[in-house]
Amino acid sequence: MGAMNAEELAKYKGVYVFAQQVDNKLSGIAFELVGEGTRLAEKLGTEVTAVLIGSDVAGLADELAEYGADKVIVVDDPELKNYRTEPYAHALASVINEYKPEIMLVGATAIGRDLGPTVSARVKTGLTADCTLLEIGDFPVTPIPGKEQKKNQLLMTRPAFGGNTIATIACPDNRPQMATVRPGVMQKLERQPGRKAEVINYNPGFTPDHKYVEILEISKAVSNIKDIMDAKILVSGGRGVGSAENFKMLEELADAIGGQISCSRAAVEAYGMAPELQVGQTGKTVRPNVYFAIGISGAIQHVAGMEESDIIIAINRDEDAPIFDVADYGIVGDLNKIVPKLTEEIKAAIAAK
């Protein structure tokens, strides 16, 4: 991958985000990326553009505008009705080559994890996956004698080495600077009803060939599990809960307080909890008002998924458990005694009202 010269780099302007839609409904990550894109664009004195790809999706442009998009580029074609790697990659790569964004953000969803790397390779740039923080700044961050410190670079921060350290990565010599970001990490803006964006229709043309897979059938997974990312109160259990049976205690606490159950990776592996309930680096990033961490030691991989919770309450028998470092309230003791007692007190307090 050859570096671009200064003249080529200067042609790339603006912050672009991939506005994921499925079945003509925008995914939450689309609004989160528009919000983050707006923050970055302000620092660069530029605009945020949402790239909307699909079939008969033009009607979604207004919603993106109301959540902060200044422009919406719509690539609308029957070949884009359902997500397939080749036509979608062709669409997004063509937008990048035509409009030359300085920054391109994609959600680290099942779709984005496939689309992002494919497109970055096609437009010959780098991509930082699973970013937890994006900033505009100088790179190298610490000046190195004899090396130019470039200004206004996208500094992309992500966990590295299994979450044991944090790396800040830049892409100073190629454009666009591309990153994938997990759902739930960035904040969407307050919706402004009636806000408008400039809408640009662009179609690079689609010619089905041997790279276009044919979709024979779409089978939707049916789950009655509510999305933990929407919960205001989460009662989360780890390996310390002791057994799948013991999670009933946590469910009773969640029911009493009007919350939902979630868990750590250890609980998925040890007690067969549903993967959709997993919080952490390999699970979901959550921001509830209250997060109970029960029998969770607090490995950095788990903490990365819940540290933005408003209030964290930890219950663990090990007083040195790292979870207490991020907890607002900590109880050291046997969860088998504490959780039922807590549930009882909460029920009594609610009944007294």
Image (tube, rainbow, N blue to C red):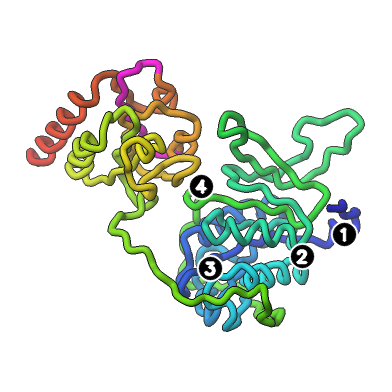
Residues under numbered marks 1 and 4 in contact, where contact means CB atoms less than 8 Å apart: no
Which label was assigned to residue 185? 4
Distance between the Cα atoms at labels 2 and 4?
26 Å
Question: Left or right of 156: which side holds 283?
Answer: left
Question: Left or right of 198: which side holds 324?
Answer: left
Location of mark 1 (residue): 8
Q: In percent of the image, x 34 and y 33: which residue is there? A: 238
Distance between the Cα atoms at labels 2 and 3?
20 Å
Distance between the Cα atoms at labels 3 and 4?
19 Å
Instruction: Please rate how many residues cluster around mark 2, counting C-alpha atoms within 10 Å: few if below 14, some from 14 to 19, many from 20.
Output: many
Residues under numbered marks 3 and 1 in contact, where contact means CB atoms less than 8 Å apart: no
Location of mark 3 (residue): 64
Above or below residue 90? Residue 302 is above
Determine whether the residue tagged by mark 1 lies in a helix, strand or loop: helix
Residues under numbered marks 3 and 4 in contact, where contact means CB atoms less than 8 Å apart: no
Determine whether the residue tagged by mark 4 lies in a helix, strand or loop: loop
Above or below residue 54? Residue 297 is above
Identify residue type, mark 4. Val
Distance between the Cα atoms at labels 1 and 4?
32 Å
Quarter of the image where one finds residue 169 = top right
Q: In percent of the image, x 62 and y 48: which residue is there? A: 129
Quarter of the image where one finds residue 96 = bottom right
Distance between the Cα atoms at labels 3 and 1?
30 Å
Location of mark 2 (residue): 100
Q: In percent of the image, x 89 and y 35: which residue is there? A: 147
Q: Which residues are magenta?
A: 308-320
Quarter of the image where one finds residue 198 = bottom right
**Mark toward the viewer: 3 or 1:** 1
Can residue 311 be found in the magenta stretch? yes
